[in-house]
Amino acid sequence: MYSASKQSFNTCVCAPSASLPPLSKLLVLSSREICEPLHNIQQLYAPGPPALPSKLVLPIRKHRQLIHDDSVPDSGYASAEDEDCDYEVDDIVVAGPCDDDDLEILRADPLERAFVIKWLTAFIARSDAWASADDLEEIEADRRAEAVETASRLLSVLLGIDQEEEEDCSVTRFFQFPTQGGTFVEVELNDAPLSNEDHTCVGLQSWASSVVLSERICADPARFSLSSVTNARGSPLRILELGAGTGLLSIIARKLLSSLHASASIFATDYHPEVLLNLCANIATNFPSSAPPPISVHQLDWERPQYSAPMNEPFDLILGADVIYHPDHARWIKACVERLLLRPTLSNSSTGTGGVFWLMMALRVSGRHEGMFHTVEDIFPDASSSLMGGDQVDNWQLAILEKAELGKLKGVGRADERGYLLFKIGWVPC
């Protein structure tokens, strides 16, 4: 699991409470000062070949002063940035070599494990500035990026252990998005545990792209066609969310339109059954007195889409956030949008009443999804490009009308995200 750029570390296993550095000093710590304790955590909780050493440094406490925290981190986001992990263990006496029984006792210690989970969560939350500090040599920058990824994997391992012992390690997240009128749109979401059977089932978690896009929508609903009771044709809006996941964008759209007493039809779609179940639960939580639910949930397979009702009629607005994790995804999504997005006609082209597809992508500069946002630019041409042409639908072609780069919100987003790209995609004449 862990290479740390082939660095070598002490093979003795120490109690994490005695070896993890205080995160208040993170910005002055080197990669080695972080990688070595991460290696210690791996040796303790995720050992692999070669076997763990038979000798172990075990602290003996005269007074236990660790803070016990049973909370579960929320998808690697920095939601607990105000909590500190700079605990001190007083009166530590380092014992001599211990046998395998001592190692098992340390591994099973719930206070040690809770301490590690809290430390890893806080480290990931603060890692952005550390991993992207100025004037880093290339090797040091690579090691810091690797350390952040390793911390995320170790946290997943520890939460997996907790999952075996607790049936439910879901996290409830609360959001408040300010609006132009000085009010707030409030949303409560359940982030369910990621599926052990299907690693592609990422929609069980709320990702930062949807949070950043939701903030933008609430700040300026008119820009996103969510300030009118009807569309330009005088009909109720039809809105589709692709890869809805926990449903944040659909819920935001419904709450904004409900404040206008609009009767829009909103359809939240995803592929995975577990995600759809969690999506339905989140809608019920946010609209407890609505029957039937004000957002309709449907399965949609981008690769093999079925265009039966309600997908048999076009949509005025399509939303998607962080939905592309493979080069094929952009191609599949484009085909779906070509079929589902309302096209201008001879009667409405002059008024610009064709539908709009808003797509938010994370700018990931490391890891397996590095540069995935480029697939959007490869599939959708720029509206001003001289290369327009090719795929055409009734003399109209989908193109990128606008593109904006957005910065990260404080306390939101994974360490491998350096910002976000917001694409406005619509129809242009060929």
Image (cartoon, rainbow, N blue to C red):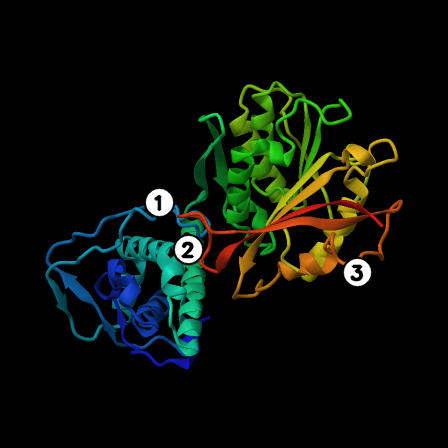
The mark that comes first in sequence, 3 or 2, is: 2
Which one is closest to the eye, mark 3 or mark 1?
Answer: 3
Q: Looking at the picture, how far across and down is residue 229, in whole percent? A: 66, 22
The secondary element bearing badge 1 is classed as loop
Mark 3 lies on a secondary structure that is: loop
Q: Tell me what residue is drawn at x 44 percent, y 52 percent.
A: 76
Q: Residues within 10 Å of mark 1 (few under 14, many from 20)?
A: few
Residue 91's label in the rendered image is none
Q: Indicate whether 43 appears above or below 75.
A: below
Q: Callout 3, which amino acid?
A: Leu
Give the Cα distance between marks 3 and 2.
Answer: 53 Å
Which residue in the structure is indicated by mark 1?
A: 71
**Does label 2 or label 1 sit earlier along the sequence?**
1
- Marks 2, 1: nearer the viewer: 1
| Pointer 3 residue | 387
> Against 183, is 116 above or below?
below
Residue 410 image position (x, y, % from top left): 40, 48
The amino acid at mark 1 is Ser
Q: 9 or 112: nearer the eye?
A: 9
- Residue displayed at 51% across by 39% down: 215
Residue at 26% x, 76% y is 55
- Whether residue 66 is visible, yes or no, is yes
The mark found on residue 161 in the picture is 2
Rendered residue at 77%/40% (across/down): 341
Mark 2 and mark 1: span between their CA atoms? 14 Å
Q: Nearer the viewer, residue 378 or 194?
A: 378
